[in-house]
Amino acid sequence: MQNLGAQLRRGFTSVFSGRASRKQAARAQDPVGTMETYRNPTEVQMSQLVLLCHTNHRGELSVGQLLKWIDITACLSAERHAGCPCVTASVDDIYFEHTIRTGQVVYIKAKVNRAFNSSMEVGIQVTSEDPCTEKQWSVCKALATFVAQRESSKVKLKQILPLTEEEKVEYSVAAERRRMRLLYTDTIQDLLAKSVIQDDLERRDCSKMVPAEKTRVESVELVLPPHANHQGNTFGGQIMAWMENVATIAAGRLCQGHPTLKTIEMFHFRGPSQVGDRLVLKAIVNNAFKNSMEVGVCVEAYRQEMESCRRHLNSAFMTFVVLDEEDQPVTLPWIQPQGEEGERRYREASARKKIRLDRKYIVSCKQAEVPLSVPWDPSNQVYLSYNNVSSLKMLMAKDTWVLTSEINKIKLYTLEDDKFLSFHLEMTVYTDTTQAFLLLSDLSRRPEWDKHYQSVELVQQVDEDDAIYHVISPILGGADSKPGDFVILASRRKPCDSGHSSGPAPREPFVIALRSVTLPTHPETPERTRGETLCSGFCLWKEGDQQTKVSYYNQATTSFLNYVTTNVSGLSSEFITTFKACEQFLLDNKSELALSLQSL
């Protein structure tokens, strides 16, 4: 086992010869790496030693150079799966956690999480290592979308077959991330239309403000053969590096120093560029907050100097900070927007900052770090819905569920980890899957079969797939107990259509995800005990004609733990009784929703 562990570590650290003797011994015993364990067939790894030519004035790896390496690695992973050339369509938000210095090693790992019709989501992990101490750091994670291109025929990608728990989670959640990307522009516009962006421009000392136009930077680049990829198009990583360069110059004009890039917000490539194109890159500081600033960058292309029409290739927004000698962010001067266009960019930057925080702390957080009840706000609707569905999918995909009991053809599974005890009930019902989905996703009907739901009020129908309910539960304890209540966000999803990709695909369930939110219109009251649910809901699979596998998942919170342990230990059969009532409810209403099915 020691040698096997050494072989696994060797994939990251064998670029240096002066390693520990255990690695040398393992390498001698297994020179071609036959002892390696399972590896994703789309996985590509890149290892780079950071040289002086890769660094900036501080001796740190240039982010532009890192973006080039990331794009190459991700593209090779996409092409390994597609079997044909691929181009970068977009790159999601990137948060840089650690800088990389000269002499350190960069490890980049990329693999395809999921394939749709002609596009793929590629997950990228970047780590760095000090070769002298063997200490490693996480640098960043990224998600990129690539599109397969083949001149002779239409591309139809084969499906990914996830095997490990991590792969199953990424595969399942990729569909939800894709949905969120498609809604991104609408989310920005809705936030600007429905929210008042607070600022204090009129109260600020204008003598300490920097005019936005002073930070404007423009640069032109001629695309030469070394800038093109193996398909003849301008290398996406090269365009991103040029964008980072002009953005850094613009940020430096505001702070009159050397800024550090902390966040990149979604690169979106709108079209291709080829050798011979002239690329015009423009950057300006849109807004400066206390310790950070947002820089907007756009790229336009043209072929000849006389062309009056330029093609918009790409836009991105980058967040910079300025660090002092102790690596702490310093206070930045205010930016003074100029003209209507400047004020629009200024206010949109505030909206994007709010959305970045939502994405970072609602979407990107580990489940254990998310508070039980998140305040409901229309501006974070997309991200709360995403977190709701993806949390349930992650819980479902875990491979450590243990079968605790099986009574009346109902299976009870449990899952224990460091922070939570979760349970999972499973049964097969002879009913249409879509009918069951419609019945169970309407929480107002749950009191018909679940005695823990005394009454349910629909507070807000957010959209077709999301609704907020106020649930009243009866008194379940002793004489001193009070009724309980919950405010629940219910998010439902039909199985994602992967674009009719070729090859077998994992079966996807219908999902009904539930989690607690807080609403100012429904505060806690002395008459009731406010309950919370972190992650619960149903997953439904079509097992055959008029046959559905129904699974219910619940990650138990502290207030619910005694009830869960009583049932898990066999001291109560309420779980089984309630789930049996659910089965009877579905059977009694088998033919009720024929008209509703036409709308799905």
Image (tube, helix red, strand yellow):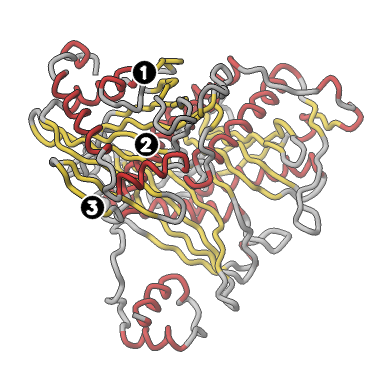
**Residue extending farthest right:** 207
Residue 117 visible from this viewpoint: no
Tell me the element at label 3: strand
For marks 3 and 1 on the same chain, the one whose residue lies earlier in the sequence: 3
Residue 422: percent from the left, percent from the top?
36, 46
Contact check, label 1 and label 2, Cβ < 8 Å: no
Question: Which quadrant would residue 479 be assigned to in this image?
Answer: top left
From the image, tell me which residue sits under label 3.
Answer: 403
Residue 468: percent from the left, percent from the top?
44, 21
- What residue is drawn where x is 41% and y is 52%? 74
Q: What amino acid is at disc 1? A: Glu
Tell me the element at label 1: loop
- How far apart marks 3 and 2 lie (CA) works out to 18 Å
- What residue is drawn where x is 45% and y is 56%? 418
Q: In the image shown, does 414 or 283 lie closer to the viewer?
A: 414
Question: Which quadrant would residue 450 be assigned to in this image?
Answer: top left
Q: In the image shown, does 155 or 261 lie closer to the viewer?
A: 261
Q: Nearer the viewer, mark 3 or mark 1?
A: 3
Q: What amino acid is at disc 2? A: Ser
From the image, tell me which residue sits under label 2.
Answer: 536
- How far apart marks 1 and 2 lie (CA) works out to 20 Å
From the image, tell me which residue sits under label 1.
Answer: 464
Q: Nearer the viewer, mark 3 or mark 2?
A: 3
Image vertical order of residue 262 relative to residue 533, above or below: below
